[in-house]
Image (cartoon, helix red, strand yellow):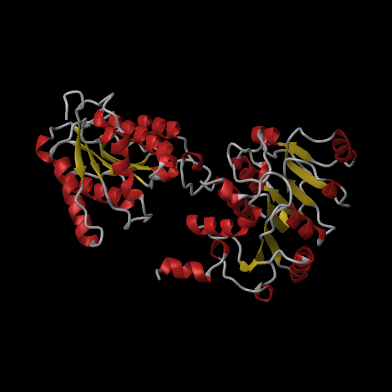
Amino acid sequence: MSNAQKLQVVTGFAGLPFGPVSECAVGEVGILGVPCEVEKGPRFGAALAPDALRAMAERVGTEFPAPGRDLGNIEPTGDWSGAVGQLVSQMAHLGVVPVVLGGAEDVATAVLGALPELPVVAAMPRIREDLVAREVNTVWLGLNGAQPAEVWGKISQRSMLWRTARQLDEGGIANISKIPERGGLWLDVSVIDLGHAAGVVGLNPGGMKPETLVATVEAMACEWQVIVITGLAPARDTRGLSELAALETLTAAFRHG
Amino acid sequence: MGDAVQPLFDAIPSFLGTPVGDLEDLTPGQVALAGYFCDNLGRPAAGQRYLARQLRYVSRPDDILMNTLDLGDANVFPLEPDKHIAAVVSQCKSVLQRGARLVLVGGDTSGAKALVTAAQQIADRDVHEVSATGVNCSSGTSPIVLCVDLEELAGNWLSRPRHLAGLTPVQMIARIEAIRGNVIAAAVFGLAPALDSRGTTETRAALAIVRAVTDRLGKGAN
């Protein structure tokens, strides 16, 4: 066995060691994979995402910019969403920052459901009712125009901040004053334009450029309390640009957050 | 076999369709291209050694650059690093001593390192190592070795991207063309081309870049 192979056996995501939550110190990150598959729609493959992200990080030699542990994957059987919520709550209680690699959108629902008072920055193409219904306002990044009128009305009524993919491509997040100081980041990889990253569950022509997504998240001076990635279907992108976009966005978030 | 059926043989594949020759065929001012079949020494990544071969395969003799010669591949000993570096430096020196300019194609960063060493030993003054993606230092008449790292291409152009951001081939070529000074040698390296249809884009991009580098060296001091 070569040294590289040995390293692969003992290290987890982006060079972090495998270990339980109890080995994480306050302020460190806990990487949790939730290989949960989408249940409807024509595009599948989200269950492969956590391990594909680990493989991409290993391939490009990414060193995670924060200390922590890779907690491994949770088996998405039985009441897995309850188990994920419980684990996220435990990490938050210990001062550990959960970084959850989904999986389908349900993974983010479980994660953010465990932290109901946390403001969320949602990078996704379509507004979600469950996020609109949260007590604290959500910041929307990369929306496309295909939103029902009543949903636009709701977020306008609550003065939620939003930017379309085109707005971000053209002007970034300059002059935005409503970015929360502490919050959670939900990255639905479908926010990226299909032409740039085909490995996504949702099709989004006219979406964000990967570089814009990375730059936007990197520019946000937000102390992330949780990050969850969903919507990645790596088998649909043989070059791996989708995983790379998710990986670079994640590391960008921790460079400043 | 009847007269109507004749076997067709293509020419030996060469960089940019240039004539194939030996050291003895080189004349001062000519641009020599040589392949570098080694990817296990400097920033190792398996597959980079195949770039030279792939570029020869996709080259067409349609628009041959004047005054160029394909010398074949440098002799390498990748399992004996000391012997390898000494041999590559020696071969690069042999080309430069004839007053020719050299483009070393493919492999890892060790080729560029050997080329810089050879240029320094040949020149009687400092040799500047200039990156195609970095700032062009104005070095007057000092010899320049141009290092073109294809890993600096944006991920969208590559079959196995390692990062998202980077230059497009057009941007990289523009930077190569804009380099001023006496460029005596260049190394183009850092790409492990996919050996199937997926690798077509990156291989053709690399070929266009090699062409720009060869063209730039053909202009001599600029």
* Residue B64, horizontal then vertical, whole percent: 25, 26
In the rendered structure, the answer to whether residue B144 lies left or right of residue A180 reads left
Residue A166 picture location, percent across and down: 68, 32
For this orientation, the residue located farthest to the right is A157
Q: Quadrant of residue A31?
A: bottom right
Q: Position of residue B50 (x, y in %)?
A: 32, 47
Quadrant the C terminus of chain B occupies: top left
Above-or-below relation of A189 to A226 = above
- The picture quadrant where one finds residue A100 is bottom right
Look at 38% across and 45% down and name the residue there: B195
Q: Quadrant of residue B208?
A: top left
Q: Is residue A29 above or below residue A181?
A: below
Query: Foreground residue, A167 or A189?
Result: A189
Residue furthest to the bottom in view is A22
Comparing A204 with B76, the one in front is A204
Above or below, B147 against A50 in this view is above
Give whichever of B117, B88 is nearer the camera.
B88
Residue at (23%, 41%) from the top-left corner?
A: B34
Percent x, y of residue A188: 69, 48
Q: Is residue A183 at all visible to an observer of this figure?
A: no
Q: Is A135 placed left or right of A210 in the picture?
A: right
Which residue is located at x 66 percent, y 66 percent? A30
Q: Is residue A131 left or right of residue A37?
A: right
Q: In which quadrant will I find the N terminus of chain B?
A: top left
